[in-house]
Image (cartoon, grey):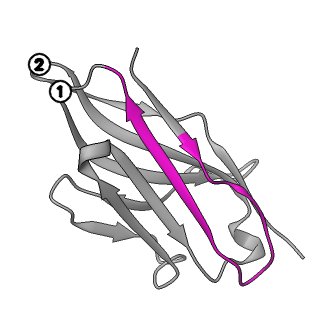
Amino acid sequence: QVQLVESGGGLVQPGGSLRLSCAASGSIFRVYGMRWYRQAPGKQRELVAGISSGGSTAYADSVKGRFTISRDTAKNTVYLQMNSLKPEDTTVYYCSADLEVVRGRVHSYWGQGTQVTVSS
């Protein structure tokens, strides 16, 4: 069974840092783009950062200069290093990955979400 498992969320003070991880496991031929989203209650899901299979990255304006996305291809894992955290970064973070599970077919999979709370 293919799944994405996130970890690393928690409670941190404003200005602090957290590192989220998301590992894809199961029978996977290839992992393509990987992304982090976040969604606050009553709001639309927001794309926070993305990284292509070639390593190109993109960020939401709200996190540029503070968050860094990276990946370990050998481990099928994507990371989100979050620095200078603000209270408005508080929400549930989800990872998503485009996986080739069946040869020639690529589908998006989602993790279960991890809570990040920034508060003093």
Q: Nearer the viewer, residue 89 or 69?
A: 69
Of badges 2 and 1, the one in the foreground is 1
The vertical placement of 11 against 96, above or below, is: below
The vertical placement of 12 against 46, above or below, is: below
For image coordinates 35% across by 22% down, the residue present is: 26
- Write down the region rendered in magenta: 6-26
Q: Secondary structure at mark 1?
A: loop
Where residue 111 appears, x then y in whole percent? 52, 35
Query: In this image, 18 relative to 72: left or right?
Result: right
- Mark 2 = which residue? 103
| Mark seen at residue 29 | 1
Q: Nearer the viewer, residue 25 or 114?
A: 25
Tag 2 near tag 1, CB within 8 Å: yes
Q: Residues within 10 Å of mark 2 (few under 14, many from 20)?
A: few
Q: Residues within 10 Å of mark 1 (few under 14, many from 20)?
A: few
Majority secondary structure in the magenta region: strand
Q: Residue furthest right?
A: 120
Q: Quadrant of residue 85?
A: bottom right
Q: Residue furthest left?
A: 104
Residue 12 is inside the magenta segment? yes
Screen quadrant of the C terminus: bottom right
For image coordinates 47% across by 85% down, the residue present is: 65
Where residue 119 appears, x then y in whole percent? 85, 71
